[in-house]
Structures are given as structure tokens and as C-alpha cells.
Amino acid sequence: MARKIVSTGRGGAGKSTFVALISKYLKPPTLLIDLDPDLSLADMLGLDFHKEGKRTVCEALYDVVEKRKSNISPTITTHDLMESLLWSDCLYEGKRFDLITLGTKLTEGCLCAPDEILRKTIPKLAKNYTNLIVDSPAGVEHLNRNIVSDINDLFVLCDPSDKSLKHIPRIKEIIKQVGIRYSHLYLVANYEFDEEAEKYLQNTGEIYLGKIDYDAHLEQYNLEGKSLLELPEDSAASLSVKRILTKAGYQIRS
Amino acid sequence: MGKVIISTGRGGAGKSTFVALASKYLNPPKLLIDLDPDESLANMVGIDLNEKGRKTISGALYDVIEENKGVGRTGYNLLSDVLQPVLYRGVEFDLIALGTKFTVGCYCAPDAVLKDFIPTLVKDYEEVVVDSPAGLEHFNRKVVVDIDDLFVILDPSEKSIKHIERIRDITRELKVGYNHLYLIGNYKFTEETEEYLRSTGEAYLGKIDYDPDVKQYNLEGRSLLELPEDSPATVCVKRILVKAGYKITDGDLTIKSSEKIAKGLSL
């Protein structure tokens, strides 16, 4: 069973950046799941999902629903059909990582349906990997949906604001009430923190693992849409992430 | 009929900061709506809703459902039971917050309540400003379908540029109507990166300059309404609003800000 890692936090805190960077240092095989409908993790890893012949969960689901409409006697449920498509059409398998992307939905209604498919499939998918990393959309709704109910390490990325500090007890309360279990909750600060602001995180009563230092390369890579996997080993952000993972008890793969 | 203004964008771009700063210069009476379950707008404009005896939509809805369990009453009056305890009425502005829910499931129900109220609410105000949660799902839910001005706040990343395309696709597919779409760059943009925003084909209104006060106020949880009139972020927001054709409320300010604009734009 894979170790299930979830990266969460307020918008812009650096959730996807953190996932992209740590994916490099974890013991393979690793499965990445991008839960953000405003998809970007694939881009950050230098992967053109569609060019690889893969579809997002939302795209596959839309086709299934449409196909089912024209089929006079649907003998297979949407969910079963979707689950098989998830493996064949939505799962990108690469040398460095595998990836599933939720994708943007262009029809009316919320994302409960595609989220639900992932929620049910994640326990099965987890069996095939050493590490399964979920990159969450900004905010709290994915927690209300209880998409990953059994988390090993929950990394909460923080930006230096009062809102971020209020976010921590808020998500803990949601997690408790909806029945999500986790082994560890770790706080990680983004580059915008200075030493003074870091004190706020040290006093929350949660485990604070440190901050990801400012990295000019990183900013440039994100702007140009270059893969973060190409970031030099000795760049500030890479070093920070390695330090944070070590602190959380991870064996770093070199 | 009030003007409906939406602030949207990727996470951390500065949606709420923009709403808080702009709120000061819009025409009264005005209503601010915080659509983000990870609520923060009230704090940013110096209101503690709890202290004011106000509930959030999620909170009020939960209470109504719990109170009616076992009573046998299946229907309840949403307007009196949900909206009344939720609407904060202030001197400067009114405010409604969606709020966090602590039960399993998505935010369709509280969003739907708001969606129903909005057409009624806009009649009572000159301007209604909706601060969206990060991302796109609020468009899928069509919480607001008739938008006057859609402000998209952006950070300098390729993801942001792609985000603009996604907003175009999603609003077109779902028939979410708007009169104007305006792009705003956040303080992280440089002159070089601003070029990306100028070449998108959408109306780019400029950037909000770096302002150490905003950073400090946000860290301490202080109201952004107390920012000095001449602070960089405030000046930029005024400039942006004027560019978008807003008549800024305070006459004095209009002159001052337009002078600054003239300078800023080197007209």
C-alpha cells in the first residue's frame, strides 16, 4: 500500500510547486494526482497530457455520459465504465512518475462526480505504488468531499497571512467532522516568509518543518512553463524541499 | 439594479485584497459577498461576523436543517431563516459570507441559496461585489450568471495565462454572461512580465504595485480599509477602477487619483 501524501493550503501558497519538487526525491513508483480543475501540475512537470494521448477524468466522464445516452440498453454503470477508462485513458505512465489529472469541466454543476470516481479508485490505485501524492485545489472543499479519507502525511503549505493561520484550525475541524484520518500534519512555509513571520508558524502547536527558500530559477521556470524537474539539484527550492522531507522522516532518493 | 462585479482568479493572486481595497471607492449602498468557504474577506475589511452576531450561509443552513429534523416541517422559509441571520448591515457596506461547512459534501447547497438570493439582493444595492473562491468551480455552479464586470486577478505564471483561456471557455460553454472582462496583474509582475498580459487580447487594466503595508496588514489580520490613501496598493486600485470607467465616490479623491493616473500612464 502506497504512502498517501496530500498537499493542501490556501490559494497560491505553493501546493503544486511542492508536489512537483518532492516527486523527484521519493522512492518510485510514484503516482501523482492533480485534483485541481484549473490544471497545472502536468505543465509544471513538463508534460503535455494530451500529446501523450491521455485524457483528464472530466473529459473521459463527459464521453461516458454522452455515450450512455445513445446506448439503448446500458448494461454497464457509468462508474464501472469510468473506472476502466481511468486505467486505460486517464493514467499517464512515465519513467519518472505516473499521473492522473482531474481536468476542467465545461458543463454545469460541481465537481462531485469526477471527484467521487477518484475517491473510490484511489484505494485501488494506491496498491500499485510506493508513494501516492495528491495535489489539492485551493481552499477547503476537497476536504469536505473526503476524497482521500486515509492520509499518511498531510502537508499544509502556508503563505504569511492571518488568513493562512486561520486556515489551519479550520481544516483540522473539517477533517475531524468529516472523518478523514491522517498520521501526520506538517506545516510548510512558502518563500514569502521572513524570520519574524515564521514565528507565527512555530507557535501554532503543529509540526512546522521549515520554509521553502526564495528561488529565482523557480519563478522563471513557472513563468515560462518549464518543467520543475529540470531545476538544478543545488537550487534553493530543491535544497529546502530535501531538508523538509528529511525532517518528515523521508529517505531521500538521490 | 445594482452593478454586479466579480473578482476571480487563481489562488493567491489577490482576489480578496482587490475586493477589500476596491470596496472603499465603490458607490454606496454596496454589498460584499465572500463566496470562499475558506472565508477571509470579512477579516480583511475589519469585520468579525461572529462578534456582530452574524452567521455564515453554511452555518445558517446547517442550523435550519438541524432545527427542522424531527419536527415534521419539511419546508422552511429560506429568506427569513437563512438570509436574515446572515446579512451584516454596516455603515460603509453590507456583507454576506458563504462560510465553512463541517459536514461531508460539496458546497452546492449553500451556493444554491446564494444563487437564489443574488437577483433579489442586487435590486437593493448600487454595487454588489462577489469575491470568488480560487479556481473555476464557482463558474460551473453558475452562482452568478449575469455579470457586469469580471475582474481576473493574475500572478505572473504560465498557469495564469492558461487560466484566462479556461475562463473564456467555461463562461462561453456555460453561458455565464459578462459585459466586461478585465485583467489585473498582481504586485509580482515586472514590466517584462506585464507584456504577457498585454498580449492576451483582453483588456488589461494594469498592475497593483508592491505595498509593504498590505503584506503587514494581512499578516496581522488588520483591516485593509485602514491603509493610507496614498499607499501604493490603494493608488493602483483607484487607477484601475477609473480605467474601468468607475466614478470613484470621493470627489477629492477622483481629482487626486486622476492626477496620479496621468502621471502613472505618462499621458
Image (tube, helix red, strand yellow):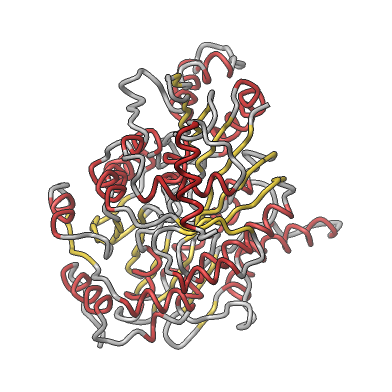
Q: Quadrant of residue B204?
A: bottom right
Please give left or right for residue A113 compared with residue A174 in the image: right
Please identify the quadrant where the C terminus of chain A is shown: bottom left
Please identify the quadrant where the N terminus of chain A is shown: bottom left
How many labels were placed on the picture?
0
Above or below: residue A109 compared with residue B206? above
Residue A34 visible: yes
Q: Quadrant of residue A87?
A: bottom right
Above or below: residue B86 compared with residue B234? above
Above or below: residue A198 compared with residue A205? below
Residue A1 visible: no
* Residue A35 % position (x, y): 49, 61
Please give left or right for residue A74 compared with residue A197 in the image: right
* Residue A13 % position (x, y): 35, 59
Above or below: residue B97 compared with residue A218? above
Residue shown at 46%/27% (left/top)?
B95
Residue shown at 46%/33% (left/top)?
B252
* Residue B229 % position (x, y): 36, 40
Choose between B23 and B255: the one closer to the eye.
Answer: B255
* Residue B179 % position (x, y): 71, 45
Residue shown at 33%/46% (left/top)?
B231
Choose between B18 and A8: the one closer to the eye.
Answer: B18
Choose between A249 and B254: the one closer to the eye.
Answer: B254
Residue shown at 32%/77% (left/top)?
A216
